[in-house]
Image (cartoon, rainbow, N blue to C red):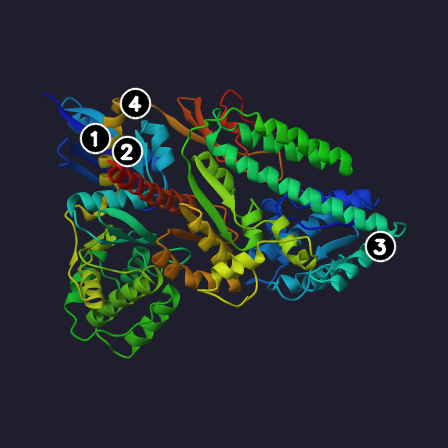
Amino acid sequence: MKESVYIGIDVGSVSTNIVLVNENQEILKKMYLRTMGNPINVLQVGLCQLRDEYNDKINVLGVGSTGSGRQLANFIVGADIVKNEITAHAVASSTYVPDVRTILEIGGQDSKIIILRNQTVCDFAMNTVCAAGTGSFIDRQAARLNIPIEDFGDYALKSDNPVRIAGRCAVFAESDMIHKQQLGYSKEDIINGLCEALVRNYLNNIGKGKEILPPIVFQGGVAANKGIKKAFEKALGHEVYVPEHYNVMGALGAALLAQKAVQKAKRTNFLGLNIVDINFQVKGFECPNCPNACEVVGIYKDDNLAARWGDKCGRWADISIESPS
Amino acid sequence: MKITFPHMGTTYIPVKMMLDELNIEAILPPNSNKRTLEIGTKISPEAICVPFKIITGNIIEGIELGANTVFMLTGCGPCRFGIFSCLQEEILKDIGYPVEFITADRFSNYEGLKEFIDRLKEVSESNSTIKIINTIRKGYKMLHEVDELAELTNKIRPREVRKGEVDKKWFNFENEIRKTYGYKAMMNIINKYRYEFNNIEIDQDKDCLKIGLVGEIYTILESYINLYIERKLGNMGIEVVRMASASEFVKEQLDFIPFLKSDKKKIYRAAARYLDIPIGGHAIHTIGNIIRGTNEGFDGFIHLLPFTCMPEIVAGSILPTIEKEQNIPILSLVLDEMTGETGYMTRIEAFIDVVQKRREIKNEGKRLYWN
């Protein structure tokens, strides 16, 4: 018998994650793929793997999409729910840690804090213009120190004398770090200092004015870093819990939301796994009709225009109008 | 003399009408757009707020269309807006646009108002004082009419049966009124569209969330810079209320006239618990209007401010306390010269999820109570 499943898709700036969840909300499969600036391609590659592995074993009941590319994913797969990643993350966390009151989420280019009370989100914040509190900051420093990012946390744990490094700005942190290196501090101590700098920056910017109460869940790609986890625990004075599927929580939330949406709608919009055979193309143009010059994007399925968006006035939403060449 | 003036939302409609009535040639720059921002940014101080950059762009676009004079408000007091005109005059001189600036200080007393009238008289040469006073009255009336029309669309948009109807009609309205000359003809267009908006088929029983827009007035009114937030929220099925408008702003200035009563006192009183002196800009309005709106049953507020806006930064630092004490969700959006909307949409959508959930819990609580 085929197993009934829901698919959750999180198209982010750094990674595209896909999860397969059964009706009991257990994860059957999770995929963590690099987006590398080509979300359509990555999505198709991911779904292709899914088809090869599961095609005759599963019956897809519904699909949810989230992440900054959620609309794009929706047009390609036909999602039952398109949800912002803040809500998706909160849903996933509170399903697996029911009494969670604070979620710390650090991804590649953005970081968020979500405050929950009585299992509902009551407040949140997201980084605005600065990347000093995100994964890319750590990524860069790891590259500079010439150690693989996977080992970063282990190095930090070996330190017993962390160095204070300015965390306000990623560029200043870098020069501060170099100065400390020249003074002869050990790699371990510097790495630990960087972890603490990131945590300090996160709490001072995104966490400012928020009441951070336990249980605290830490998720997103950076949660793999044990050094950051320890730095959070030190700064907050509480245990920080990293869930098993910390790096795909957004996709997981989307799948759970899809389950709810389909139960309500009693049908799915999913276009089937064979969409991987369709040739998708994106063509953009600058609208010539007013000085706003909106960048309009059209998505083509096997050379047929399927949807268009990006215009402020909505004139191009009607796909029977031909795009200007 | 060909006069141009910067944009702030739909204020161009009454301003152009007033110039028309006084027989002065008005050069209307295109609505603020990507190019406006680009040319404005190029010649503005780097760290100044985005309204300055757009206004500078508006002026240049007006000059390109043949204007040789710029009309704008000024005056010390509100915020650095008071120095916009002198700074812009210098900048334009530097890059080879020696245009004349006609500025009017705020007219918050009889002297100021008289100065404003004298200014208009100087500009329009042949007009009598009576004609000018009449024109100001017409301008005041039209300012209110246009704001009311925008308020009407914010009520209808979330409830319209055929999606996009309001937006299409508004687009046509602006197109038509731009090409129309003088008070009578422009008023006819406003009346025509009011009728059309009122006749859009709506879902009467729809229970919409009600969100107030508070913060710095320019970012509330100028849709280009707030990413058309009224439209976006409206099309998500949310009733939006502007808590600051040009007509209310002018009314507050004219508050000294005995029969004109603005909400100023009520706003100040509401804000007093958190902020009891005006600190410039609309900071006290932000606080006061949130308190008033909360008491009127609003579901939440979106606080808009330009990056580096001092008064709103101060107001913003008070908001977490208000959120907690008044138990009301508030989202702050800092606006600058960005064009990528995804990040903003994520925050707005998540905020709406929070507000929606609260409403559901509240309704359930009520039902339980009545059972």
CB within 8 Å, label 1 to label 2:
yes
Secondary element at tag 2: strand
Residue B76 on image: x %, y %: 66, 66
Does residue B336 show up? Answer: yes
Determine the image quadrant of residue B107: bottom right
**Nearer the observer, disc 3 or disc 1?**
3
CB within 8 Å, label 4 to label 1:
no
For the point 81% across and 43% down, the residue is: B21
Residue B54 on image: x %, y %: 61, 52
Quadrant assignment for the C terminus of chain B: top left
Q: Is residue B179 left or right of residue B359?
A: right
Between residue A305 and residue B185, name the one nearer to us: B185
Quote the CA–CA distance across marks 4 and 2.
12 Å
Dot 2 alpha-carbon crowd within 10 angstroms: few under 14, some 14 to 19, many 20 or more:
many
Inspect the image, locate mark 1, and give the three-letter code of the amino acid beneath it. Tyr
Dot 3 alpha-carbon crowd within 10 angstroms: few under 14, some 14 to 19, many 20 or more:
some
Q: Are marks 3 and 4 on the same chain?
A: no
Residue that badge 2 annotates: A64
Residue that badge 1 annotates: A6
Ranked by sequence position, the earlier of labels 1 and 2 is 1
Residue that badge 3 annotates: B121
Dot 1 alpha-carbon crowd within 10 angstroms: few under 14, some 14 to 19, many 20 or more:
many
Quote the CA–CA distance across marks 1 and 2.
8 Å
